[in-house]
Image (cartoon, rainbow, N blue to C red):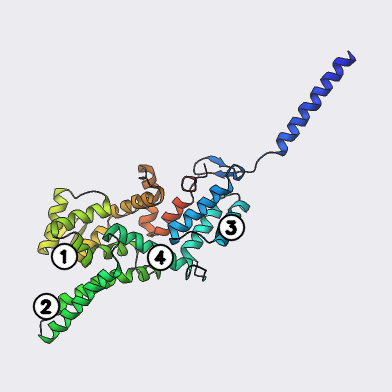
């Protein structure tokens, strides 16, 4: 009997010791309330965290982080248990910080330069600004000639060409300074000499403008309305608005609900390499239409576990 009692006591001692060890090794985790899952920083390797930081830098400012930047942001994420708030703080810094940094004049300037480049890549095949300058130079010469000849129509036409192409060059600075919206950036990318050359004649221009902004071609009714607007300067209704010339047509397209849906789709494709689901479009749509805050749309995607690969 004494031996049985000693065996039972030993078993209870071992069981208690196991419970103590298990509770002492319990991991701290952050909860992803959006996905209703737990993300444990202890199961995410340092290499994976560094990969996330590196990807953020490349996608937002167009370069890899310096060693000091990589170490600083990686440590910051670890110290804050990879929380969404910590991720958001890093994204916000890369989008808005104006402090001079090694490798860039500032994160904010680099961010808007990077965004300008990828928008031009989408809309005008990444044309260098020298292409727009060439149109400006030719139009400036025509302007002088028209003034000398008293050709008021020629003067107006040359000034319009200069303005349209200069607007593309200035878009980066005007958007960074809050003087224009993301809609107007894309509007300028539609209404310039380079886009006209890439998509020569009205037929191609209309189809390309729909495809580039909305990822679809126009219906026959939409095409007929657009053609009348651009080719004959007729007042026509399209996408919930009215236009009577090419410039107004570009404005209407970039102010439409479909523009915002296309912007959401483009952002998912560039950051995640996939189309958004219908529900994801719905989740972002109202805020984007109301605020026009493209940076908030980017941020919402960049702090997800899917983008970070913290899964």
> Who's the residue at 12% across and 87% down the image?
148
User: Marks 1 and 4, Cα distance to the nearest angstrom?
Assistant: 30 Å
Q: Nearer the viewer, residue 220 or 17?
A: 17
> Does residue 264 appear in this view?
yes
Of labels 3 and 4, the one closer to you: 3
Mark 2 surroundings: few (<14), some (14-19) or many (≥20) residues within 10 A:
few
Element under disc 2:
helix
Mark nearer the N terminus (1 vs 4): 4
Q: CA distance from mark 2 to mark 4?
A: 37 Å
Q: Quadrant of residue 117?
A: bottom left
SS of the residue at dot 1? loop
Q: Earlier in the sequence, mark 3 or mark 1?
A: 3
Q: Which residue is mark 1?
A: 245
Judge whether residue 239 can be spotted in this image.
no
Neighbour tally class for label 4: few under 14, some 14-19, many 20 plus, Cα within 10 Å: many
Per the image, the residue denoted by label 3 is: 71
Of tags 3 and 2, which is closer to the observer? 3
26 lies above or below 254? above
Relative image position of residue 155 (x, y in whole percent) = 15, 79
Q: Are marks 2 and 4 in contact (CB under 8 Å)?
A: no
Q: Is residue 148 left or right of residue 86?
A: left
The mark closer to the camera, 1 or 4, is 4
């Amino acid at each position: 009997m004494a031996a049985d009692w000693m065996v039972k006591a030993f078993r209870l001692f071992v069981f208690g010791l196991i419970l103590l060890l298990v509770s002492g090794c319990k991991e701290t985790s952050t909860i992803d309330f959006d996905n209703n899952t737990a993300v444990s920083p202890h199961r995410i390797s340092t290499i994976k965290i560094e990969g996330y930081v590196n990807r953020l830098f490349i996608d937002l400012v167009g370069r890899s982080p310096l060693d000091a930047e990589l170490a600083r942001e990686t440590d910051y994420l670890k110290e804050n248990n990879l929380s969404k708030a910590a991720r958001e703080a890093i994204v916000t810094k890369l989008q808005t910080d104006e402090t001079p940094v090694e490798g860039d004049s500032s994160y904010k300037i680099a961010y808007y330069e990077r965004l300008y480049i990828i928008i031009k890549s989408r809309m005008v095949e990444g044309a260098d600004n020298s292409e727009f300058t060439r149109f400006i130079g030719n139009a400036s010469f025509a302007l002088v000639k028209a003034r000398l000849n008293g050709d008021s129509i020629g003067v107006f036409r040359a000034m319009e060409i200069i303005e349209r192409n200069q607007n593309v060059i200035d878009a980066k600075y005007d958007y960074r300074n809050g003087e224009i919206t993301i809609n107007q950036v894309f509007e300028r990318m539609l209404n310039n000499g380079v886009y006209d050359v890439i998509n020569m004649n009205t037929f191609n221009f209309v189809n390309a403008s729909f495809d580039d902004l909305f990822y679809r071609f126009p219906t026959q009714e939409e095409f007929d309305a657009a053609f009348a607007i651009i080719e004959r300067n007729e007042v026509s209704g399209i996408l919930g608005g009215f236009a009577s010339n090419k410039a107004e047509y570009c404005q209407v397209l970039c102010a439409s609900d479909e523009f915002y849906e296309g912007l959401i789709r483009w952002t998912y494709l560039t950051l995640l390499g996939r189309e958004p689901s219908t529900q994801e479009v719905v989740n972002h749509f109202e805020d984007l239409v109301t605020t026009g805050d493209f940076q908030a749309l980017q941020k919402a995607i960049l702090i997800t576990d899917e983008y970070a690969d913290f899964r």
